[in-house]
Amino acid sequence: MKALIEVCKSDITTLKVDAIVNAANCSLLGGGGVDGAIHRAAGPKLLEECKTLGGCEPGDAKITDGYALSARYVIHAVGPIWQGGTHDEESLLERVYKRSFQLAIEAGCESIAFPNISTGVYGFPKKQAAKIAIATTQTIVEQVTSLKKIFFTCFDEENYDLYMKLLSKDD
Ligand code: ADP
């Protein structure tokens, strides 16, 4: 059976899923936005593990334990910083979603929740980012049977509306 894709409007740290994805920065040593929220909710051991990872390149991701979170794993995904669209931002965003799925699948996850990577402080245009996130996810869903549920966690109204619209179009 194909995985179900759901859009939800919630704080990603509260979700009971196998893995939540963090919109991290290259250092993997914590930041603001969703990264700060995840580190606060997971507790200090998360930072301790992140310190051992040696950072992460844009377009790549690394997996850790979820510690105090309900989620078993955190996948720290480094999205591109928007620089006007001329610095490979679109393919880097696609790559970071693919890589996050790959890590989740390797860890045996059946459920995974994504935030809207790069659309906060990193400034990626929201509609363009949503289209890439959805298209990449739909490709994975066609290819992989071990995943059961994929959540797009939309924290702001604009992203929520965009995802609802884009996903209902395909029905
Ligand atoms: P980036 O640096 O990749 O842009 P941000 O953390 O600034 O990362 O923003 C990414 C997205 O995460 C934004 O759409 C923001 O609204 C959202 N966000 C912030 N806090 C949370 C949270 N607790 N749960 C889910 N999404 C969140």
Image: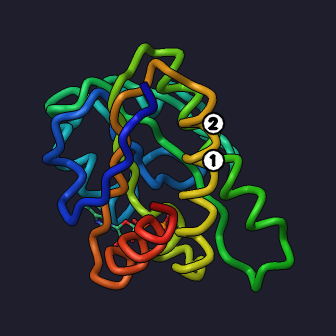
Mark 2 to mark 1: distance in Å?
5 Å
Ligand 1 lies in quarter: bottom left
Residue at coordinates 36% horizontally, 34% vertically from top-left?
A: 74
Question: Dot 1 lies on which element?
Answer: helix
The amino acid pointed to by label 1 is Val
Q: If the image is split into quadrants, where does the N terminus sit?
A: top left
User: Which one is in front, 63 or 162?
Assistant: 162
Q: Position of residue 163 (x, y in %)?
A: 41, 70
How many numbered circles does the render carry?
A: 2
Q: Which residue is mark 2?
A: 99
Q: Position of residue 65 (x, y in %)?
A: 33, 23
Circle on res. 96:
1
Structural crowding at the residue carrying mark 2, measured as other residues with C-alpha within 10 Å and reported as few (<14), some (14–19) or many (≥20): some
The amino acid pointed to by label 2 is Arg
User: Which one is in front, 65 or 93?
Assistant: 93
Residue at coordinates 38% horizontally, 47% vertically from top-left?
A: 5
Vertical side of 93 occupied by 2: above or below: above
Q: Is residue 128 visible?
A: yes
Horizontally, residue 168 falls left or right of residue 129, namely: left
Vertical side of 132 occupied by 65: above or below: above
Residue at coordinates 24% horizontally, 60% vertically from top-left?
A: 8
Question: Dot 2 lies on which element?
Answer: helix
Structural crowding at the residue carrying mark 1, measured as other residues with C-alpha within 10 Å and reported as few (<14), some (14–19) or many (≥20): many
**Mark 2 and mark 1 residues within 8 Å of each other at the beta carbon:** yes
Horizontally, residue 58 falls left or right of residue 28, namely: right
Residue at coordinates 36% horizontally, 56% vertically from top-left?
A: 152
User: Which one is in front, 39 or 152?
Assistant: 152
Q: Is mark 1 within 8 Å of ligand 1?
A: no
Looking at this view, name the residue that lies furthest to the front. Answer: 171
Q: Position of residue 155 (x, y in %)?
A: 27, 70
Q: Is residue 47 visible?
A: no
Circle on res. 80:
none
